[in-house]
Amino acid sequence: MSYGYLVRKRKPQEETIREKAINEARWTYWRGISNAWSKYTHDNPRIKQAEKERDKAIGRTFKLYLSEDPNYNPKLFFKAVLKAYEDHADKVASVWKDFIKEMNKLK
């Protein structure tokens, strides 16, 4: 008697369980980095200013593209949001570099 059909039926279920576990691990990893970054920069005025500017730019983008435009164009909206995040990244890059150096000292 062959039991191969049981293995085939169980395999996709195990893969979805494994994928869920991997996705949860990734989210936990990124939440950890986010928490570490927040603690590292909690008193840095340059970071706080960059975050305020980013939030204002995203707020303006939401107002411009979502509330006033009846012919909403998602490409323009996402380009504007991406631009806000790119500007933010340019402003905090040097602090991020120092943060990564400090975190690598723990290895």
Image: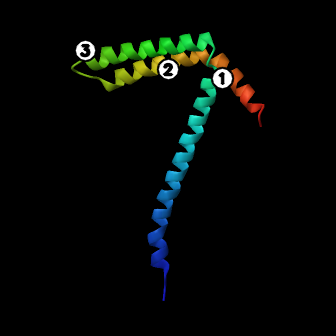
On the rendered structure, is 37 left or right of 1? right
Measured in 3D between alpha carbons, the distance from the residue under mark 1 to the one under mark 2, in whole angstroms, is: 20 Å
Q: Residue at x 37, y 16 (%)?
A: 61
Query: What is the three-letter code of the residue carrying label 2?
Result: Tyr
Q: Are marks 1 and 2 in contact (CB under 8 Å)?
A: no
Where's residue 45, x and y in %?
60, 10
Q: Secondary structure at mark 3?
A: loop
Q: Is residue 19 above or below residue 48?
A: below
Q: Identify the residue under disc 3.
A: 68
Residue 34: percent from left, percent from top: 58, 30
Q: Position of residue 102 (x, y in %)?
A: 74, 26
Is 40 left or right of 83, judged from the image as shown? right
Among numbered discs 3 and 1, the one appearing first in the sequence: 1
Q: Residue at x 56, y 13 (%)?
A: 48
**The quarter of the displayed image where residue 50 is located:** top right
Looking at the rendered structure, the secondary structure element under dot 1 is helix
Query: On screen, 9 above or below 86?
Result: below
Q: Amino acid at mark 1?
A: Tyr
Instruction: Kindly identify which residue carries mark 1.
Output: 40
Residue pointed to by mark 2:
85
Q: Nearer the viewer, residue 39 or 50?
A: 39
